[in-house]
Image (cartoon, rainbow, N blue to C red):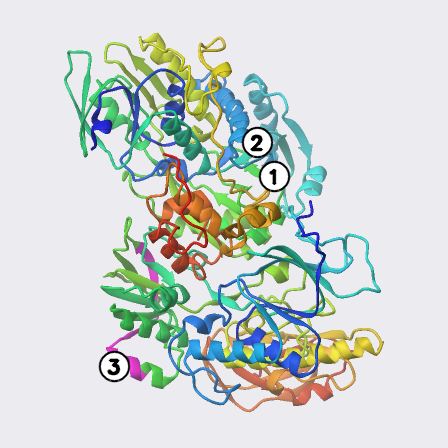
Amino acid sequence: MNHTRPSGPVQVEVLVVGAGPAGLSAAAELRRLGAGPVLVADREPEPGGIPRHSWHTGYGLRDRHRLLTGPAYARALADAALAAGAEIRPGTTVTALAPAGSGIGHEVRGPLPPSIGGGGPQTPDRGGHTATMTSARGIETVHAAAVLLVTGCRERPRPARLVPGDRPTGVMTTAELQQRVYLGGERLAGRAVVVGAEHVSFSAAMTLAHSGARVVALVTEHERQQSYAAFRLGAALRWRIPVWAGCAIRRVVGRGQLAGVEVADVRTGSARFIPCQTVVFTGDWIPDHELARTAGLDMDPGTRGPAVDTMLQTSAAGVFAAGNLVHAAETADIAAVSGRHAARQIAAALDARARGRGPEPTRLPVRAEPPLRWISPNAIAARAGPPAPPLGRFVLRSWEFRRLARLQVIQDGRVLFRSRPVRLIPARPVHLGASWLSRADLAGGPVHVQLRG
Amino acid sequence: MTDAEVRPADVVIIGAGVVGTAIARTLAGYSLDCVLADAAADVGTGTSKANTAILHTGFDAKPGSLEARLLRRGSELLRSYAAAAGIPVERTGALLVAWTPEQSAALPAIADNARRNGYHAVRPVAAAELYAREPSLGPGAVAALEIPDESIICPWTTPLAFATEAVSAGVRLLLGTSVTGVAPSGDGWHQLATTRGPLRCRWVVNAAGLGADVIDRMFGGGGGFTVRPRRGELIVFDKLARPLLSSILLPVPTARTKGVLVAPTVYGNVLLGPTAENVSDRGDLGTTAAGLRSLLDAGQRIVPRLVEEEITSSYAGLRAATEHPDYQIYADAGRRYACAGGIRSTGLSASLGIAEHVVSLLESAGLALRPRVTGLSGVFGLSGPLGVSGHSGVFGTPPVMAYIGEAGVRPYQDAGRIAADPAYGQIVCHCERVTLGEIRDAMASPLPPADLGGLRRRTRAMNGRCQGFYCAAAVSRLFASSGRADLPRAAVAVPT
C-alpha cells in the first residue's frame, strides 16, 4: 500500500521535524553554515511552537539577547529561518521515519514499528532517511541526508497523573488554557485551581487572571513552590494567589461541568472540597516522542526522549534530536540554543560524510543516579576530543529538594569531577560543566553522575 | 416538541443505547411509525459508550441461557453488519491465560462450556506457544485457551450506525427526552409523560439500560427485576503500548466476575480493566484511587511493561446488572409492551440478536409487521421476515459510517481522498490524526454531535495522549462553528 504521489520523493539536505524555537533556530543555523535545502515541517497551522500562545514576556534572553513576548519571539525565529533560506511547511505532519532504502517510502502500518537498521533491504550507499508527510498538499515522501527531531514536549494531562473522580469539562493543561484564552479569545469566569507550583504554573495563573477567572490556589505535592521567589511574590502581591504546598488533588468532582476538586494534605491525608469551575494541570512534562519511538530510536529512561550524545545525535546515525524532546522542559531560549548546537553538529557530520571520513563515533552512556532524575545529553560522542554539549554543560533534574548537594562524575570507580555545592529543586535545571570530558576514558564503562555522600 | 415529534407513533423505544438503537433499526425495516427516545443529548451515551469494547463470541456464556443464544446470534449478525457499515472491528482472537495449576485445571471445563454453546474453535495453548505469541506476557503463565474469534470493536460507531440507519428509514429520534410516567390507557394507546411533553403510541419497548427497572414498573413490573449497577473502571494506555500484545488477554473467570483483561482497542491503544464494584448511584461514573491502583497491579502482573507506558485516559462504566444471572427480556401482549432489561456486560455483542428476539416477541404479542417496501436505506430484495425466528436483522443496507479504526486506511493516509478534498490532509488532532475534513463531516452528518463528547465519539478528536494539550482549543472552536465557519470549502450539503 503506497500512497505516495507519483512525483517522487522531495530531496532535501536536512529535514527538521518541528518548527518551535529549537527547530527554527536549527534551520537558520544550518543555512548560515551553508547546508543545502532545509525543510522544516510542523503540524500546527503556524510555525513557532509553544511561544505562539504564551503571551507573557521573557522570551529570547539567551539566544536573541532581548526580551520578547512569546508570539513576537515565535515570529522573529520564523522570520530568521525564512530569511536564511529554509523552507517552513506548517500544517504538515511527519507520520513515519525510516532509513532510506529500508523499503519504507510510505508509512509502515501494523502492530510493530519499523526498526531502524533492520527489516527490509538496505541500500547502504544511498544513506540518509526517508520520511512520510501528510498535509493538505497530499502525502509526500521526503529524502534527507540528515534529520533533526525537535518535536518538543507536553504537560502530562490529568488521566496520566492518575487523578481519580469524574470526567467533567473544565479540566485542562496550561497549553490548552493559553490557546483558549490567547488564540481563541475565550473568557473564563469563576474560580480556578492550578495544579503545580513551578514556572509554568505561575504562567497559567497569570493567564487565568487575564481571562477573568479567580485563582483560588496553586497546589503542589512538593514541600514548597519551585519557581523563582520573584514570581511567587508577584503572584502573591498582585493576585493574592496562595501556594498550598504539600497538597495533592485527590479527586475531581462534577457531572458534566466541573464542580470542584478534593485537595488533600499529603502527610496527614486530611482532605477538603474546593469548589471551582476550572482546574489546570501544569508542568510534569513529557517529551513528544512518538516519531522517535516509532522510528525505533533508543530512548533514555530518564528524560523519556531519544538518547542523545553530546553531538545531539541519536542511536541512528544521521538522526539528531534537540530542544525539549531531549530535556523536557527547559525555557524556549535554551531549546533554541540546543537546536543551534545540533545544527552545527549536523553540518559537521554532513561535511565529514562528504569527505568520506570514517565510521560514525560510538557512544559512551552518561547516567544520572537517584535522586537525580535525568541528565541531558545522556551519552558522550566517543571520539578524540569529544564535542561538548550545548552551552558547554549538561543539564539535570532532581526528584528532590536538596540545599547543598555536590555532584560527582564517576567512571569505572574513578572520580572524574566533583562539583561545588548546588541547590536541587524539582522541575528546575541543575547544570554540570563539561570540563571533565577530556578525562573520560572513551573506551571505558558508562559514566555515572551522582550526589556525593 | 414539534408536530412531527408529537404525532402518535406505532412504537416508542425508550433508550437509545446500543440495544435500543438496534431495536429501532430492526423495526425500521417494517411499515411502522417508530420513535426512539433517550434522556441524553446523544445516542449511546450510557453503558454503551464505556465498556471493554469487545465483540464476544459468547464462548463463556451459560449454556442454555437466553444470553448465550442471543450473544451467539447477535455477534454473528454484528460481524457482518460492521463489515458493511464501516464499524471498526479487528479479529485479534483472545488468549485466556491460566496463572496457577488450579486455573490451568479449570481450562478444559471452559473449553467444554464453549462447545456446549456451539463454539468449537477453542483450542488449548501450551506455555511455550503462549510466550511465543505474546512475548511481553508477565512471567508465571502456565497454560492458555485460544478463542480465535474474539474480536475488538468500536463501541461508539455501533449505536451511531444503528441510529443513523433507523433515522434514515424514518424513525423519529427524540433526544433529551426522559420518560417520566405513563397514563392508564384503555383506548389502545399509551400516553407517555416525558420531560418534553406527552407522547402517544400503540406499543412501548423498554431498552432503558440502567433505568430499565424503573420503566418496567411503569408497565406493571412484569420483569420483576431491579437494576444493580456494577461499576467497571478501565485504564487506556498510550498507542506506543500497542505492540506489547497481539491478542485479547483474558483471565480465568471467578464466580463473581470475568476479571481484569488486557486488550488492544480498535483505536490502537491498550485497555486494562474492568474492576467490578456494586454501586447504588446510577450516575456514579467516577474512577477511584483504589480501583485504578488495583488495575495497575493487575496490569503489572499480566504485561509488566504496560505500566511503564503513559496512561491516555481512564473511565468508568456501569453494567446494568440485576439480581438475575440472565437477560430479562419479555413481552406483555395485554400492555402492548416489551422489555429488554438486565443486559449486563454483553449488550454490544448481542445487540442485533436482542433486537431480532424483541421484534419476534412483539410480533407474537400482536404487533403487525409488514415489511417496508421502499425506504431510504432499504433494499427491496432483502426486506421482510426471513429465517425460522421469523425475522432477520438483515433487511436493508447499513449506512456507511466514517471509519475511525486503526486497522484500515484513515483519511490522513489516503492520498486519493486528500487530492479530492485537501481538508482530509489537514490534521487537527495530532495524537489521533483526526483531520478537519472528518470533523466537518461529523458536524454535517445525519446525527451530528450535541457536544464535544459526541464529537470525540464520532471522530476520536481529543481522545489521544495529550488529552487536548494541542488541539482542544481548536477542536472546540470548530465545534462551536459547526465545523463550517473556518473551512476552506463552502458549506457541505447536508442530507435532510
Q: Nearer the viewer, residue B96 or B206?
A: B206
Residue depth check, mark 1 versus mark 3: number of the one nearer the observer: 3
Where is residue A339? Give x, y as percent.
Answer: 60, 77
- Tally of numbered tags: 3
Where is residue A213? Give x, y as percent.
Answer: 25, 68
Tell me which chain the residue with mark 3 is part of: A
SS for dot 1: loop
**Residue A373 sits in quarter:** bottom right
Task: Name the quarter where the N terminus of chain A is drawn.
Answer: top right
Q: Nearer the viewer, residue B159 or B465?
A: B159
* A317 in magenta: no
Amino acid on which disc 1 is placed? Ser
Is there CB contact under 8 Å for labels 2 and 1? yes
Image: magenta residue range: A233-252
Where is residue A249? Give x, y as percent.
Answer: 34, 62
- From the viewer's perspective, tell me whether residue A327 is left or right of residue A264: right
Amino acid on which disc 2 is placed? Glu
Q: Which residue is mark 3?
A: A238
Q: Which residue is mark 1?
A: B247
Q: Which residue is mark 2?
A: B150
SS for dot 2: loop
Q: Residues within 10 Å of mark 1 (few under 14, many from 20)?
A: many
Amino acid on which disc 3 is placed? Arg
Residue depth check, mark 3 versus mark 2: number of the one nearer the observer: 3
Where is residue A444? Give x, y as percent.
Answer: 77, 78
Lower position in the chain sequence, tag 2 or tag 1: 2
Task: Name the quarter where the C terminus of chain A is drawn.
Answer: bottom right
Tell me which chain the residue with mark 2 is part of: B
